[in-house]
Image: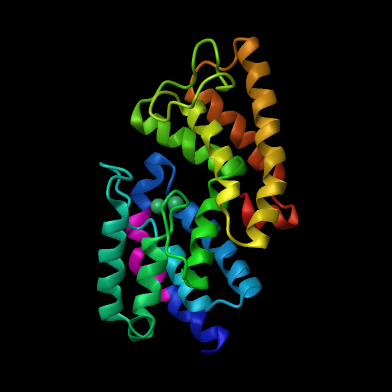
Amino acid sequence: MLAAEIDAVHQRLWLAVCHYWEPNKIHGHGPDHAMRAYSLGLQLAAAEGADPLVVGAGCYLMDAGLRADIGRAEHIERSLRIASALCEEMPELARVRELLLTAVRYHEAELEFPADLPKEAVCVRDSDTVDRLGFPGIRMTLQYGVWMGRPLCHPTDPLCCERTPELNGFSMDYVRYLETLPPRLLTPLARSIAMEKQDQRELYYGEFLSALRQGLMRDHEDALRLVAVYMQARKGKDRDVLHIS
Ligand SMILES: [Fe+2]
Ligand SMILES: [Fe+2]
């Protein structure tokens, strides 16, 4: 397919799925997560020689099954059902149905995957994982913490330096846990972007601690405001428009 034809399919798909993503802003996984993953997915597809039709569609579908009321629980199964239904309606997707469903099924970095995972699925998986890093990843994690009602951070070990992260215990423990994701990346481009994003986490940790010591880091709202300041400051820079904003 020509690039313009692929783009047209993606646009139609987005119109069909954006209503699933929209309510999930409440826990940080709204349309902006889809858009960043999509942009990155197309870059990874070009670098890996993967089919951009499948990769772009996979990025728009992977988290479509998230819900504002129950969050992540069984979202992959719901995303698969949404993807299957759309394959019935869109012949261009029906032709790549199995590949697309595989990409959705294995999109989460923590999931075991088969040795022969197709490169399209690799690209979707790395796109989702890279977007969980750096400022966007911190913001998604904090926002999910608000929604879950998690406390912001441990009272005596706020950045979880001396404990195993309690993922449902504290939002900042989950932020610390995100450091375990880069070794799970499968493509060189995703790994190099993850390296760039490491600085963002270190910067955030430093400012977080300093604000905490001054009594200015009282709740998730303060923590999210700090991320927003950085994300705003980085807007407009070449790669950041794509990966961070
Ligand atoms: Fe997901
Ligand atoms: Fe995701």
Residue 227 vertical placement versus 85 (above, below): above
For this view, does 230 lie left or right of residue 88?
A: right
Residue visible at 65% across and 72% down in the picture: 47
Residue 17 included in the magenta stretch of the image: yes
Asked which quadrant contains residue 209, the reply is top right
Residue visible at 29% across and 48% down in the picture: 67
Asked which quadrant contains residue 217, the reply is top right
**Image location (x, y in percent) of residue 140:** 48, 41
Residue 37 vertical placement versus 135 (above, below): below
For this view, does 117 lie left or right of residue 88?
A: right
**Image location (x, y in percent) of residue 177:** 52, 34
Residue 96 included in the magenta stretch of the image: no
**Image location (x, y in percent) of residue 144:** 41, 36
Asked which quadrant contains residue 203, the reply is top right
Residue 114 vertical placement versus 163 (above, below): below
Given residues 104 and 2, the one toward you in this image is 104
Segment tinted magenta in the rendering = 12-21
Magenta segment's dominant SS is: helix
Outermost right residue = 237
Given residues 201 and 38, the one toward you in this image is 201
